[in-house]
Amino acid sequence: MSIAKSGIIIGAATLVVLFIFFWALSPGSTPAIKDEQGNVPADSIASLDKVDIGGMDQWILVRGKDVSNPVLLWLHGGPGAAQMPIARHFNGALEEHFIVVHWDQRGAGKSNPFGFEEQTMTFEQFVDDAHQMTQYLKKGSIKIRYTL
């Protein structure tokens, strides 16, 4: 193989690796909620937010067709079992009746940063985090009527 071909292959591989690296570090997003005509309803909400809970950044996905609906705080199946990536596919119907808040709790999904201290994953810390999250949601522009 010639030096020119080797350089092209190495350059292309480097670009692919850099793309994957920066894509993995990006915070991501969630698409807007749309009605049957493809319009974004004025009272809908669709956001992916970083929140300081328990002294660390934790992520929530907030989606609903009407901000006047009650809030449903979705707790995933346990440490390491984040469901945010599949939330819209399996729970999209809930967005009709609730403001669904999917929360990647500490140590799971987007809330599992490099260098995360696993010793902070105690029952007491999870309870305190849940209390802080409900307080955060109460302070926000979303009116809480139910928290599950």
Image: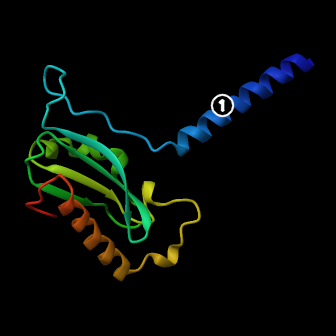
Describe residue 111's horizontal placement relative to residue 113 as left or right.
left
Which residue position holds label 1?
16
Q: From this viewpoint, is residue 1 visible?
A: no
Residue at horizontal 92 percent and vertical 17 percent from the top = 2
Rendering quarter of residue 28: top left
Residue at horizontal 25 percent and vertical 40 percent from the top = 46
Describe residue 84's horizontal placement relative to residue 45 as left or right.
right
- Compared to 23, does 40 lie above or below? above
Q: Quadrant of the C terminus?
A: bottom left
- Compared to 1, does 27 lie above or below? below
- What coloring was used for the rendering? rainbow
Q: From this viewpoint, is residue 139 visible?
A: yes
Q: Quadrant of the N terminus?
A: top right
Q: How many marks?
A: 1
- Compared to 114, does 88 lie above or below? above
Residue at horizontal 34 percent and vertical 46 percent from the top = 48
Front residue of this view, candidates 110 and 131: 131
Task: Report x, y in % for residue 87.
Answer: 29, 46
Rendering quarter of residue 21: top right
Question: Local crowd at mark 1 within 10 Å, few (<14), some, or many (≥20)?
Answer: few
| SS assignment at label 1 | helix
Task: Report x, y in % for residue 71.
Answer: 14, 55
Residue at horizontal 60 percent and vertical 37 percent from the top = 20
Front residue of this view, candidates 105 and 45: 45
The kind of residue on which mark 1 rests is: Val
Most distant residue in the right direction: 2
Task: Report x, y in % for residue 4.
Answer: 88, 17
Task: Report x, y in % for residue 45.
Answer: 21, 41
Most distant residue in the bottom direction: 124
